[in-house]
Amino acid sequence: MTITRKTTVHTLLKEYPFLLEYLAAYHPEFGKLTNPVLRRTMGRMATLDKAAQLANVPLNQLMNDVAGEIQAKTGARPSVADAPGVDTVDPARLEELAAIVGELHAGKTPMRSSRASKSSSPTWRPPRSPPWSRSSSRAACPRTT
């Protein structure tokens, strides 16, 4: 099994039931997993990404901690898919932000930055009115007074 950010708590507990006690002790919010009803409902929806946000811990740390516990109990460490961009900043994005800050210091507005000029925003159009509100459909309905 590979542990990823999309791995659900349900999948982990199905594969490694001993993780229930570990997760319950890992963070007070995870203690709710000891309730079978909550475990069945929330465990199926909660991914490790959401669990890390709930516990306010970095995702890579949570995944590695879980993998470490699995290794301690079974002797085999599952593979962990590194979550790029979770604990690190994309260098290209960092350069882009530095350029925007430089332009702001030069007196340019954010709308004139190179980032804004690259994106072509579509022209806004008002939404079409629904068919029942058009004048032609009103004529078909007799007016009662």
Image (tube, rainbow, N blue to C red):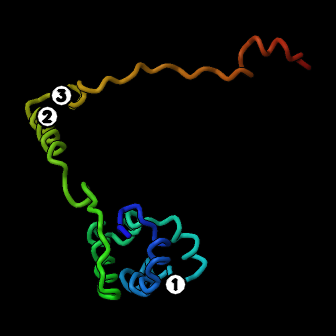
Choose between 4 and 104: the one closer to the eye: 4
Amino acid bearing label 3: Ser
| Element at label 3 | helix
Apparent side of residue 51 relative to residue 130 in the rendered image (left or right): left
Instruction: Find residue 59 and report its image quarter.
Output: bottom left
Residue 50 image point, x, y percent = 41, 64
Residue 107 on image: x %, y %: 11, 29
- Give the position of the N terminus as an image quadrant: bottom left
Residue 7 image offset from top left, x and y in percent: 42, 65
Question: In the image, is residue 143 above or below residue 63?
Answer: above
Residue at image mark 2: 104
* Element type where label 2 sits in the image: helix
The residue indicated by pointer 1 is: 34
Inter-mark Cα distance, 2 to 1: 52 Å
Q: Is tag 2's residue or tag 1's residue first in the polypeptide sequence?
A: 1
Q: Mark 1: which secondary structure?
A: helix
Residue 96 in the figure: left or right of residue 55: left
Mark 2 or 3: the one toward you? 3
On screen, residue 53 above or below 143: below
- Tell me the CA gap for discs 2 and 3: 11 Å
Instruction: Residue 114: give its label.
Output: 3
Tell me if mark 1 has few (under 14), some (14-19) or many (20+) residues whose alpha carbon lies within 10 angstroms of its own. Answer: few
- Residue drawn 8% across and 31% down? 106
Q: Earlier in the sequence, mark 2 or mark 3?
A: 2
- The amino acid type of the residue labelled 1 equals Thr
